[in-house]
Image: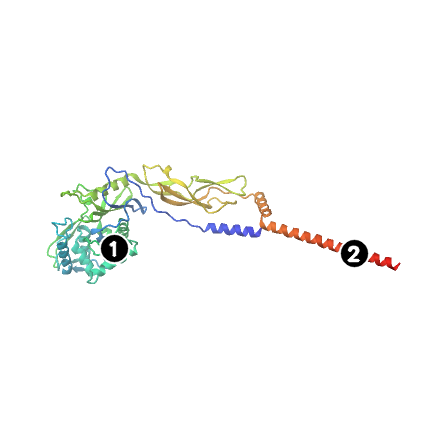
Amino acid sequence: MKKFLCILASVVLLLGTIKTDIADALSFTPTLKDKISSEAVVLYNIDTTSVVYEKNPDKQMNPVQLVQIMTAVIVLENVTDLNQKYECPVEIYDEFTRYSDTYPAEQFPYNEVTLCDLDAGDAVTVKELLYAMMLSSSCEAAGTLAYHVGDGSVEKFVEMMNQKAKEIGAVNTKFTNPHGLYDENQYTTASDMMTITEYAMTVPGFIEIASANTYKIPSSDTLSVEINLSNRNLMMNADSEYYYPNAKGIKTGSSGQSGRCLVTKASKDGQSYIIVLMSSPLGLDNDESYTNLKDATALFDWAFDKIKHTTILQSTEEIQTVKVNYAVGRKSINLRPAEDVQCMWESTLNTASIDTSDITYLYKELNAPIKAGDKIATLTLRYSGDVIDTVDLVAYSDVERSIFKYSSEIINSYFKSASFKNALRIACALSVLYIILVLYVANKRMKKRREKRLAQSRKR
């Protein structure tokens, strides 16, 4: 019995060490009036760090000027004095000339080099260059920053960009330049772009710059003209038909090959979202409609109206009833979630449609005694086949052990065990040997008596 109890205790200790993993968040299908035109989309709730909608999140896309988000990250992490001045090097303007020759505007609309009127030799502060880049997609600002932070080598700066992308988990991204002008070898995904943006928002100074509406670079002894900058995200412009009061920053971009792209943030009623939209149609026949901004507005409205932080499973809910051995006055016990399960949930969907049948038990048989709250199983919650979350299932109440039931089972188990059968075989064998020995001794005695009687008869 001691051996049996030791084995039982070891099993209980082993089960107590098992841990569960948290599954990926659930992505919903929005009910919208118009179809989402962007090729790749990720809509991310900042507060719960969960994706609520995605479309082709891992499809390889050209990032155009969204590249400048990573450029800003590298600069902010490597420059301690943002008030130091950098001179715009002539080398970067040579690159822009070559690019314009390769993609002439009359043949490649939307492929122009975006500039903010900084000339070669002009010197402005790092902060001013960052504002010029993030608000107006200034290629000369991006090139100047890369040239100086890369110690005179834009290529070295691009290596820093790629290294940082790998460090933060954007492993499906490759940068070839710091400004985002079209290059067929430069690529990312909407998911990676969300990873980069989420990281960028943790870098001191980034949000302040990326979410500014306007910024003025004053004239100075190193800059002959004043430069007024406005954020190219029209969702921030109160005079635009695309104005969205809750939108802030972060980056726009476009090219003839890549369509319109956008990364922006919006907050309302205590909820905050980031959205990445890539390769939205540019429009035909001089149609200047910003399909990416329409997509962003529709998805933000849907999320703020329909997606709520909801308790989808309560800790008091009885999920399953399981058989328990050796219990006093009962044969089963109820299981409940260890804690409330909450997530972002589409309010038009019924939580009763969540599948709660995927239960993994931590044992083959459950034996008393059991304490309320003891972990018994894990439950994987699913909706339409997608995993929502994984939660521990625990005992709803205490279960006492019946000494009579337990002892009877131990005795019955022993009589059915191989040990008992082996003991019985040995006992039978010993009994046979004993009988043989007794017969042998008796036979010997009888033989001696006969011999004694025979000897006595001869003497007479």
Callout 2 crowding tier (Cα within 10 Å): few <14, some 14–19, many ≥20: few
Residue 162 appears left or right of 312: left
Task: Give amino acid for label 1.
Answer: Lys
Residue 446 is drawn in which quadrant? bottom right
Task: Give amino acid for label 2.
Answer: Lys
Q: CA distance from mark 2 to mark 1?
A: 106 Å
- x, y (%) of residue 453? 84, 56
User: Mark 1 falls on what kind of element?
Assistant: loop
User: Mark 2 falls on what kind of element?
Assistant: helix
Residue 10 appears left or right of 228: right
The single residue placed furthest to the front in the displayed view is: 458
Relative height, residue 329 to residue 96 (above, below): above
Check contact, mark 2 vs mark 1: CB within 8 A.
no
Numbered label attached to residue 174: 1
- x, y (%) of residue 351? 36, 38
Numbered label attached to residue 316: none
Quick one: 63 or 433, which is closer to the camera? Answer: 433
Nearer mark to the viewer, of 2 and 1: 2
Numbered label attached to residue 447: 2
Relative height, residue 173 to residue 382 (above, below): below
Can you say which quadrant of the picture contains the C terminus? bottom right
Residue 13 appears left or right of 163: right
Callout 1 crowding tier (Cα within 10 Å): few <14, some 14–19, many ≥20: many
Q: Is residue 314 visible?
A: no
Relative height, residue 16 to residue 81 (above, below): above
